[in-house]
């Protein structure tokens, strides 16, 4: 009796140890002239403090839309489903109605860095002023303190002459420096959750390496939760602890990065890895995934990958399957349809 | 939502112009504005046919000066009539009215409105251009007609009332819309030709030619338009005929507004010029003519049409403003500005409110142009986000 | 008949730059003293980051950029074309034989022309065919080689995905039956699964049509897989050139080594940190004197003697060329 009660109590305890971010059953649709487009279908993700979740996908996969949904940055014609939940630090962001609540999330608990650094800095305002502005919005400090924090942050991200750069405009910095400045700006409010949307894609390879090293150090130092979105599997392998593979708005495979990259189970993940040129294996031929990514207007019914899957059956029964993740090995989740084709 | 494969194929094989047209037709407000605009333009083109009276002094009704609008009715205390009619008015002055002229309504005598009646004579397709000197004189004898849409056998039918000399306001308004549109069209055309040449050379060649032409364009743009208009318009001698004046004002409008359009043309050209598909054509050795005709011109046709439509309201407003001050078109020529000029006096405001009816038409005309222009711009540029 | 199809000798390409009407004219040397020989039938890779001059070099070889010093010679079957002394008639001939595939599949196709017209444009401009039927036949022929559905020829570019558009671009480049193709970042804008498809197509076309490619890219993994010889560029100079296997297994120049180590490995257990290069890529307007890489080189000596070295390639092992300054630090 006592042991049974203890079991119940410990189960409850484990339940209350909440995740930093939890997305449950998220559907995102856009109402456009051409009709209702499904951008994300039944996505569920979890992220803990101090961990990096990589989201990998090609164009149309919905990875950017996922990140923007967390910050509620999607355009006005977005439709969320009623039973979806995006829980950050125990608050459901989708239920927020007032601007003040959103303000807490945006820049406060959650920060975002983008692919195009030129686009996130206003061209006519000095970088320093932009950094101070967002600090003053979220923290109860005065201008001088804000300036000190910002300059320290610029130093921390490896920008030499931080004081001088603080007073410069965005166009005076090179691409790599701008990206670092954006990281500094995002981190200055000490967010718990960092969303990084293709932060290194627009950078040269050597600069990319510098920025990745920087991010790895900072993530460890500040113990943030990070969602790292990219199409580059190599970057994911180096930065992420867990990875979710998305295709046309659905998560097809999810799990620890070692496991997914070494033992991919879904045909799409396998296809992606085979299509990649690996510099350590120059003899392997490049195997493209046949066909092309369908337009979101033509989203296939049932299993979205069936139009390109090498294991698709002749009778097209995959059109009627309902997608959903199944735990194949501890921590390694694969979409139902992908599980079945292993048996082929 | 299932889209049939036929529709998809139609989308894939649609040219840019077809896509723009489809998008425009889907825009409700633009379509409504467009139909109203089209209706007004057609009415103005047929203004002589639709007007029961000659809008000039020749058609004035001496018996009904400063008269209130007369709306035909179908029913009065004497019963219903399928044919619309008006009551007769008699002018009366007496001690009880303080010896002011007043109109008494006689409800017994009905005057029926007839359709397709014969009325005053007017000419169609009659061009008579009489510029200084004899070199550019141009005369096409039109053919005359005297059919009108509606009229009455005795008395007058003045749907919008009359002004102080008895001229029918309805006819004047219709003719004014036509003249204002004509001036606007001519002005836009002149502006378009100039901006195409100057903006085109500037944008296509770039370099120092561009810098020079841009300095010239900006110099013209910095001159404030109203004083410039006023100065240039004041130069027009009073003895010029009304057609000459009309031509002169249109040219003036075109000459003052080309810089804005030229800048737009140049911008379009500069951005299109550096597109990769143009470079691809150049690398095959395509000549300048080929690039201009095959690539550049089609690329900005839709933009230029939008720019033209959007510049129309500015032309209309400029002409109205000029005529309103008295420097543009003058009596006897009708334009909306001329009509508005009559509406400035205080006793008009108090007693003859129907003088303001042309204002309503001016506003509607400008708004419809703006909505159509906006709709065209939205249709031509699908990359901008809505919401 | 030379075994090389392109010989580039001491080529430099400079651009005039003038900030505005009144400021001084400056010269930017985008490409500096390049010497390469591209063999017939090879897949020559040109790798570099921004500011390396690789695009300028590619376009100079095609005659699209003006050559400042040195020359470029195209060795055709029966005669040679020297791009510095070429006249307009010969230029027309040259253009038929050497073509360019662009990077951006969305900007490289005119949205107002059907696919058939886009592919046919080079034929019409260069007056290669005499009748519409002949043009149509050649268009259909090359379109099917590029695996384009012939029914789609009536469609406009907005109907196609990135990968399909790139195939249209390739078809357009190949329709005039060229011998030499410059592919400038042709797969950079494509998704990974489509990249592989286009690269395989390029290889296949090379065998079918006997082409020589100059493949320009910033993505080393891609270049490693498809190219047989690779040259690495930095700020207008070639710092290393070797057969691709040799280059990637045995890099000698510090820049090449840093580039290779920067590629994030797909093996998550290989968490080795990249060789971090100090600082940023210098501006092309103000390159460092002597060895241009010295401002970031981990082997740069304290006395700055590299500022006086004259750059130039030295053959370290047969076929493997390294810049003089890099040889010493190896």
Image (tube, coloured by chain):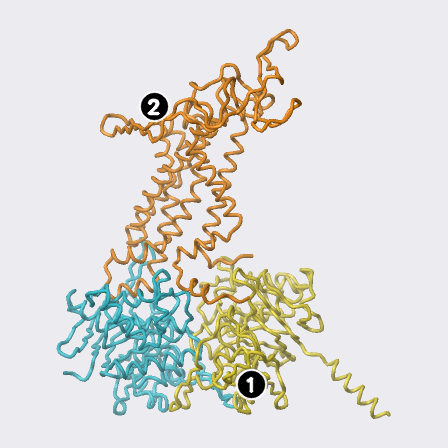
Looking at this rendering, what residue extends furthest in the right direction?
Answer: A1
Q: Quadrant of residue B193?
A: top left
Looking at this rendering, what residue extends furthest in the top direction?
Answer: B95
Q: Which chain is orange?
A: B
Q: Secondary structure at mark 2?
A: loop
- The residue that mark 2 highlights is B241
Q: Position of residue B197 (x, y in %)?
A: 30, 46
Q: Is residue C305 visible?
A: no
Q: Chain of mark 2?
A: B
Residue B80 appears left or right of C285: right
- The residue that mark 1 highlights is A338
Q: Which chain is yellow?
A: A
Q: Quadrant of the N terminus of chain A?
A: bottom right
Of B33 and B353, which appears nearest the observer? B33
Q: Secondary structure at mark 1?
A: helix
The answer to whether B50 is drawn above or below residue A73 in the figure is: above
The count of marks equals 2
């Amino acid at each position: 009796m006592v042991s049974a009660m203890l079991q119940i109590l410990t189960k409850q305890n484990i339940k209350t140890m909440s995740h930093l971010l939890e997305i449950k059953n998220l559907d995102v649709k856009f109402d456009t002239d051409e009709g209702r487009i499904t951008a994300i279908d039944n996505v569920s993700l979890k992220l803990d403090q101090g961990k990096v979740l990589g989201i990998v996908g090609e164009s149309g996969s919905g990875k950017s839309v996922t990140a923007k949904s967390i910050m509620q940055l999607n355009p006005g014609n977005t439709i969320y489903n009623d039973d979806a939940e995006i829980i950050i630090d125990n608050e459901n962001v989708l239920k927020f109605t007032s601007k003040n609540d959103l303000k807490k999330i945006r820049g406060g608990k959650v920060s975002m860095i983008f692919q195009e650094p030129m686009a996130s800095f206003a061209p006519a305002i000095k970088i320093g002023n932009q950094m101070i502005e967002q600090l003053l919005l979220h923290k109860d400090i005065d201008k001088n303190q804000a300036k000190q924090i910002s300059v320290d942050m610029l130093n921390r991200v490896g920008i030499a002459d931080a004081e001088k750069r603080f007073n410069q405009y965005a166009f005076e910095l090179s691409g790599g420096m701008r990206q670092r400045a954006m990281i500094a700006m995002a981190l200055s409010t000490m967010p718990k959750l960092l969303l990084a949307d293709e932060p290194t894609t627009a950078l040269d390879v050597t600069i990319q390496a510098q920025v990745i090293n920087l991010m790895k150090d900072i993530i460890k130092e500040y113990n943030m939760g990070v969602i790292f979105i990219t199409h580059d599997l190599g970057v994911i392998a180096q930065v992420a602890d867990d990875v979710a593979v998305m295709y046309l708005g659905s998560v097809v495979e999810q799990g620890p990065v070692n496991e997914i990259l070494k033992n991919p189970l879904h045909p799409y993940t396998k296809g992606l890895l085979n299509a990649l040129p690996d510099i350590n294996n120059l003899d392997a031929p490049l195997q493209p995934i046949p066909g092309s990514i369908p337009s979101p207007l033509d989203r296939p019914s049932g299993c979205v990958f069936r139009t390109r899957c090498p294991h698709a059956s002749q009778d097209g029964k995959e059109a009627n399957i309902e997608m959903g993740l199944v735990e194949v090995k501890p921590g390694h989740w694969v979409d139902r349809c992908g599980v079945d084709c292993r048996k082929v | 939502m299932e889209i049939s494969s036929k529709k998809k194929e139609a989308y894939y094989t649609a040219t840019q112009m077809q896509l723009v047209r489809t998008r425009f037709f889907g825009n409700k407000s633009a379509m409504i504005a467009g139909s109203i605009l089209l209706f007004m333009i057609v009415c103005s083109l047929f203004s002589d046919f639709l007007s029961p009276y000659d809008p000039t002094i020749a058609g004035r009704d001496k018996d009904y000066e400063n008269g209130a609008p007369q709306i035909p009715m179908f029913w009065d205390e004497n019963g219903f009539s399928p044919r619309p009619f008006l009551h007769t008015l008699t002018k009366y002055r007496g001690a009880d009215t303080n010896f002011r002229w007043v109109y008494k309504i006689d409800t017994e005598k009905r005057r029926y409105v007839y359709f397709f009646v014969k009325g005053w004579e007017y000419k169609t397709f009659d061009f008579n251009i009489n510029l200084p000197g004899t070199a550019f004189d141009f005369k096409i004898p039109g053919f005359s007609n005297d059919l009108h849409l509606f009229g009455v056998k005795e008395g007058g039918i003045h749907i919008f009332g009359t002004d102080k000399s008895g001229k029918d306001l309805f006819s004047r308004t219709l003719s004014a819309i036509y003249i204002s549109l004509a001036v606007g069209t001519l002005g836009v055309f002149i502006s378009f030709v100039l901006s195409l040449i100057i903006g085109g050379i500037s944008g296509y060649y770039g370099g120092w030619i561009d810098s020079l032409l841009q300095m010239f364009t900006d110099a013209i743009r910095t001159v404030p338009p109203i004083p410039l208009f006023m100065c240039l318009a004041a130069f027009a001698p009073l003895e010029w005929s009304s057609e000459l004046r009309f031509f002169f004002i249109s040219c003036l409008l075109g000459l003052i507004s080309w810089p804005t359009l030229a800048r737009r043309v140049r911008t379009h050209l500069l951005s299109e010029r550096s597109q990769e598909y143009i470079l691809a054509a150049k690398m095959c050795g395509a000549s300048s003519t080929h690039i201009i005709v095959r690539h550049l011109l089609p690329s900005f046709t839709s933009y230029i049409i939008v720019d033209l439509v959007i510049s129309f309201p500015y032309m209309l407003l400029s002409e109205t403003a000029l005529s309103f001050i008295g420097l543009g078109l003058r009596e006897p020529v009708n334009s909306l500005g001329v009509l508005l000029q009559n509406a400035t006096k205080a006793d008009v405001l108090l007693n003859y409110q129907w003088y303001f009816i042309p204002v309503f038409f001016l506003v509607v005309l400008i708004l419809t142009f703006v909505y159509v222009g906006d709709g065209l711009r939205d249709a031509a540029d699908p990359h901008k986000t809505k919401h | 008949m030379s075994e090389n199809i392109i010989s580039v000798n001491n080529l430099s390409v400079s651009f005039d730059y003038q900030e505005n009407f009144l400021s001084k004219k400056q010269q930017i040397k985008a490409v500096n003293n390049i010497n390469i020989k591209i063999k017939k039938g090879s897949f020559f890779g040109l790798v570099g980051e921004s500011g390396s001059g690789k695009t300028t070099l590619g376009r100079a070889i095609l005659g699209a950029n003006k050559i400042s010093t040195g020359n470029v010679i195209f060795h055709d079957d029966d005669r040679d074309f020297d791009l510095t002394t070429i006249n307009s008639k010969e230029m027309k001939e040259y253009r038929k034989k050497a073509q360019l595939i662009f990077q951006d599949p969305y900007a490289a196709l005119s949205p107002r022309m059907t696919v058939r017209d886009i592919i046919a444009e080079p034929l019409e401009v260069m007056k290669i065919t005499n009748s519409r039927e002949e043009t149509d036949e050649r268009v259909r022929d090359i379109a099917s080689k590029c695996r384009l559905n012939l029914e789609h020829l009536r469609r406009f570019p907005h109907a196609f995905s990135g990968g399909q558009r790139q195939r249209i671009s390739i078809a357009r480049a190949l329709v005039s039956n060229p011998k030499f193709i410059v592919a400038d970042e042709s797969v950079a804008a494509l998704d990974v699964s489509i990249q592989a498809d286009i690269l395989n197509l390029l290889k296949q076309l090379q065998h079918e049509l006997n082409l020589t490619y100059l493949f320009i890219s910033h993505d080393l993994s891609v270049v490693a897989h498809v190219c047989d010889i690779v040259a690495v560029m930095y700020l207008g100079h070639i710092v290393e050139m070797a057969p691709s296997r040799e280059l990637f297994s045995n890099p000698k120049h510090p820049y090449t080594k840093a580039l290779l180590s920067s590629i994030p490995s797909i093996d998550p257990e290989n968490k080795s940190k990249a060789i971090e290069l100090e600082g940023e890529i210098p501006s092309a307007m103000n390159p460092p004197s002597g060895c241009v890489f010295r401002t970031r080189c981990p082997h740069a000596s304290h006395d700055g003697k590299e500022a006086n070295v004259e750059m130039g390639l030295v053959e370290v092992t047969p076929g493997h060329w390294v810049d003089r300054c890099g040889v010493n630090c190896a």
